[in-house]
């Protein structure tokens, strides 16, 4: 009998039946080998491949009739043709601001001519303070509204621990005490009520326009008055290519933040929103009320304050939308359309900063 210890037989001396079995074994071996190869490839590179493929999904194109009509309060005419590969306007006629579609110098001059003061609010509660605040403020001094009159509002539970930063001319920093919360979600959600109150107080008197930001990011490029408008929303860098039905809106009808299937324009990121004091009073009042109603019903929207923000922007459309270049997550990897990121997410180190 010609057989090896592995059970393979010499094909010359084996019957057709045994030959068939041999082929099946070989096929199985190859299938196993290729699957193992494929699985490890997907594990190592699949995420990046998926992200790359996602970037190819078209965003839609601004109709020519609309583009000629669109102007911006701060930059004047927008050069939509400079970015034919991305969506540069919304269906309700608001511009989506991409790099190269605006002239930053015109916007700077216009903000100075109007003698504007711009507010920047940021919360640094608990361990978020040590981890992110200094770099956030340092980078804002280098890139945020450079040459403009501005005021920072830092909300924290430990005012004495706020790092001292050398500020440029015409720039102020105010520290506002807030109480800590035992859950990070509560800190995040409580921002809406605190901002509502601050906008009705000194912040609202000092600033004409305000941007409200997360602290876990840093500026890496000029972020100037081209971003100003009555109501400004930020496209979420993880979702701007996704079809609407996939967007992570709150779907539970009991929540004040609920959007039904078919509702919603874009998915906006709560790490950055802005606008005039009056518009932001309305936004923060709406979100704070929605959060309170949910709490009374014992529910919490899937993405907390961000879900309520998305509901607000569905009901009251932003007058300017910022492209993901204004708030980009480097984890997504390289995309040709992201030319000049202005704010980058810091790596999420939840184990370090969250309870
Ligand atoms: N935040 C804070 N302390 C906390 C939780 C949140 O200061 O314990 C503030 C901080 O500004 C943070 C923002 O709330 O950037 C939103 O929370 P986080 O960035 O963790 O949410 P994510 O961006 O991951 O949704
Ligand atoms: Mn964040």
Image: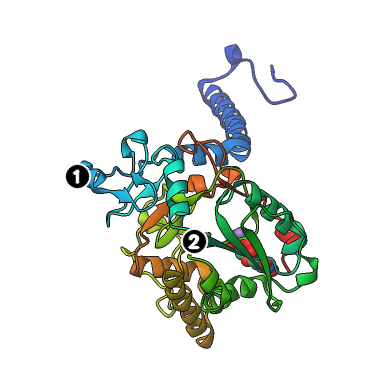
Could one spot residue 239 in this view of the protein? no
Q: Of residues 27 and 71, which is closer to you in this image? A: 71
Q: Residue at x 26, y 44 (%)?
A: 67
Residue at mark 2: C-beta within 8 A of ligand 1: no
From this viewpoint, which residue is outermost toward the bottom? 296
The answer to whether 218 appears left or right of 313 in the picture is right
The vertical placement of 112 against 206, above or below, is above
Residue occupied by mark 1: 65
In the image, residue 129 lies at what x, y percent? 74, 63
Q: Is residue 183 above or below residue 345?
A: below
Q: Quadrant of residue 30?
A: top right
Residue at the far right in the pictured view: 160
**Crowd class of label 2 (few under 14; some 14 to 19; many from 20; radius 10 Å):** many
Tell me the CA gap for discs 1 and 2: 28 Å
Mark 2 or mark 1, which is nearer the start of the sequence? 1
Q: Is residue 157 above or below residue 5?
A: below
Residue sitting nearer the eye, 202 or 242: 202
Q: Residue furthest left?
A: 65
| Residue depicted at 52% across the width and 70% down the height | 305
Kindly indicate the quadrant of the structure image that contains residue 8.
top right
Percent of width and height locating residue 3: 70, 20
**Circle 2 is placed at which residue position?**
273
Position of the C terminus by quadrant: bottom right
- Can you tell me which quadrant of the image ligand 2 is in? bottom right
Residue at 57%, 75% (x, y): give it: 202
Residue at screen point 75% across, 71% down: 159
Is 190 or 259 nearer to us in this picture?
190
Find residue 57 and report its horizontal and vertical position in percent: 38, 41
Residue placed furthest toward the top: 12
Q: Position of residue 264 (x, y in %)?
A: 35, 62
132 displayed left or right of 314? right
Q: Secondary structure at mark 1?
A: helix
């Amino acid at each position: 009998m010609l057989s090896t210890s592995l059970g393979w037989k010499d094909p010359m001396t084996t019957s057709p039946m045994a030959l068939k079995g041999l082929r099946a074994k070989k096929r199985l071996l190859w299938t196993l080998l290729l699957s193992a190869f494929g699985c490890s490839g997907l594990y190592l590179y699949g995420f990046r491949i998926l992200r790359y493929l996602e970037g190819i999904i078209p965003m839609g194109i601004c109709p020519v009739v609309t583009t000629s009509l669109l102007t911006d309060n701060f930059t004047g005419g927008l050069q939509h043709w400079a970015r034919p590969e991305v969506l540069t306007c919304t269906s309700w006629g608001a511009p989506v601001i991409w790099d190269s579609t605006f002239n930053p110098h015109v916007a700077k001059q216009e903000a100075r001519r109007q003698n504007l003061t711009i507010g920047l609010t940021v919360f640094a509660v608990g361990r978020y303070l040590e981890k992110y605040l200094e770099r956030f403020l340092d980078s804002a001094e280098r890139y945020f509204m450079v040459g403009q009159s501005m005021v920072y509002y830092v909300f924290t539970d430990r005012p004495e621990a706020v790092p001292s930063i050398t500020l440029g001319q015409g720039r102020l920093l105010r520290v506002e005490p807030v109480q800590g919360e035992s859950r990070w979600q509560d800190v995040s959600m409580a921002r809406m009520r605190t901002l509502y109150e601050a906008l009705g107080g000194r912040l609202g008197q000092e600033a004409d326009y305000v941007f409200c930001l997360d602290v876990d990011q840093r500026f890496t490029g000029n972020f100037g008055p081209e971003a100003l408008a009555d109501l400004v929303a930020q496209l979420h860098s993880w979702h701007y290519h996704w079809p609407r039905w996939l967007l992570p809106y709150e779907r539970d009808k009991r929540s004040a933040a609920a959007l039904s299937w078919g509702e919603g324009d874009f998915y906006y990121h709560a790490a950055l929103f802005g606008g005039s004091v009056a518009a932001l009073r309305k936004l923060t009042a709406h979100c704070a009320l929605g959060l309170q109603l949910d709490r009374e019903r014992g529910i919490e929207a899937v993405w907390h304050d961000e879900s309520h923000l998305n509901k607000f922007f569905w009901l009251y459309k932003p007058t300017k939308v910022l492209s993901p270049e204004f708030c980009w997550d480097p984890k997504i990897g390289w995309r040709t359309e992201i030319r000049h990121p202005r704010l980058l997410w810091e790596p999420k180190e939840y184990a370090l900063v969250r309870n």
